[in-house]
Image: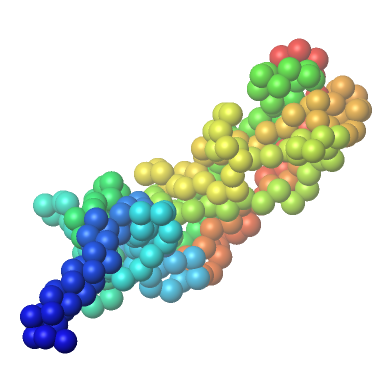
């Protein structure tokens, strides 16, 4: 092979090698998730912790153009406040509470940014207790019209800290430990996030320390016991509410709610 032919061959092979590269593929993720938090609050003077009590950083998931989860790029977090109530530890990336208030921040991976998220900086939660507003008796209308709202009651809980201070951002877990049998594939007794909201088993305390957004619902037409559905008999449902800090149940857990249930004709 002549030197000229060898040179041409090398150039052709080099061109083929470049052609095999996907120059249109983005460098880094095609999309990212919102910020995934281990908790919705951090205690002043402490680090953010997960449900087991272990210090844990926020997470941003990243995806390729096919929507598949990928790795390889560490997220950066930027606090937006001029006098932030918290800071990120430079070594661990864990949020540290500095003073009471709210901290607002975003996440970023290679130019892609998340929406802003807010985290409450609070005192340490020390107790969980029953709030006000729960009904003693849930009167549930007997009707086959599923557009009619079921009988319901709030499941109010309060979380407080030192000095009887309200604690915001604590996740309260609910469990129905005594229920009523259903004649339907769907449960007759269930918890939703607000009226007509999705099924849930958790709520989060607000600035007043209250978790009172969830409702216990009872649909009379689903009750297997006709006597309860038609108002001839009263039975009860029990719901337990719990919350934790550093992996341990807060004193006062579980908070016990007992709801009496009876069906009524027409509107309750």
In the image, is 67 to the left or to the right of 3? right
Q: In front here: 176 or 11?
A: 11
In the image, is 232 to the left or to the right of 206? right
The residue sitting at 39% across, 50% down in the picture is: 168
Q: Is residue 211 among the parts visible in the rendering?
A: yes
Point out residue 110 in the picture as x, y percentages from the top left corner. 21, 60
Residue furthest to the front:
1
The residue sitting at 71% across, 22% down in the picture is: 146
From the viewer's perspective, is residue 209 above or below residue 2? above
Point out residue 42 in the picture as x, y percentages from the top left corner. 34, 61
Residue furthest to the left:
4
In the image, is 196 to the left or to the right of 90? right
The residue sitting at 51% across, 37% down in the picture is: 213
Q: Quadrant of the C terminus?
A: top right
The residue sitting at 13% across, 79% down in the picture is: 5
Point out residue 226 in the picture as x, y percentages from the top left corner. 91, 28
From the viewer's perspective, is residue 192 above or below residue 63? above
Q: In front here: 121 or 61?
A: 61
Residue furthest to the top:
266
Q: How many marks?
A: 0
């Amino acid at each position: 092979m002549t030197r000229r032919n060898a040179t041409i061959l090398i150039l052709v092979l080099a061109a083929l090698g470049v052609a095999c590269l996907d120059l249109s593929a983005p460098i880094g993720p095609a999309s990212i998730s919102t910020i995934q938090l281990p908790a919705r609050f951090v205690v002043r003077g402490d680090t953010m912790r997960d449900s087991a009590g272990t210090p844990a950083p926020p997470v941003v998931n990243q995806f390729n153009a096919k929507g598949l989860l990928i790795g390889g790029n560490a997220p950066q977090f930027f606090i937006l406040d001029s006098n932030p109530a918290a800071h990120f530890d430079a070594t661990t990336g864990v949020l540290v509470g500095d003073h009471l208030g709210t901290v607002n921040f975003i996440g970023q991976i290679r130019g892609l940014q998340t929406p802003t998220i807010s985290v409450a900086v609070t005192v340490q939660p020390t107790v969980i207790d029953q709030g006000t507003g729960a009904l003693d008796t849930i009167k549930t209308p007997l009707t086959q019209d599923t557009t009619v709202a079921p009988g319901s009651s709030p499941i109010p809980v309060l979380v407080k800290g030192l000095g009887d201070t309200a604690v915001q951002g604590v996740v309260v877990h609910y469990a129905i430990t005594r229920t009523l049998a259903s004649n339907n594939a769907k449960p007759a007794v269930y918890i939703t996030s607000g009226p007509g909201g999705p099924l849930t088993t958790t709520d989060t305390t607000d600035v007043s320390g209250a978790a009172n957004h969830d409702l216990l619902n009872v649909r009379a037409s689903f009750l297997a016991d006709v006597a309860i559905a038609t108002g001839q008999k009263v039975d009860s449902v029990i719901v337990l509410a719990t919350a934790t800090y550093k992996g341990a149940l807060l004193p006062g857990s579980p908070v016990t709610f007992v709801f009496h249930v009876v069906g009524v004709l027409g509107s309750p």
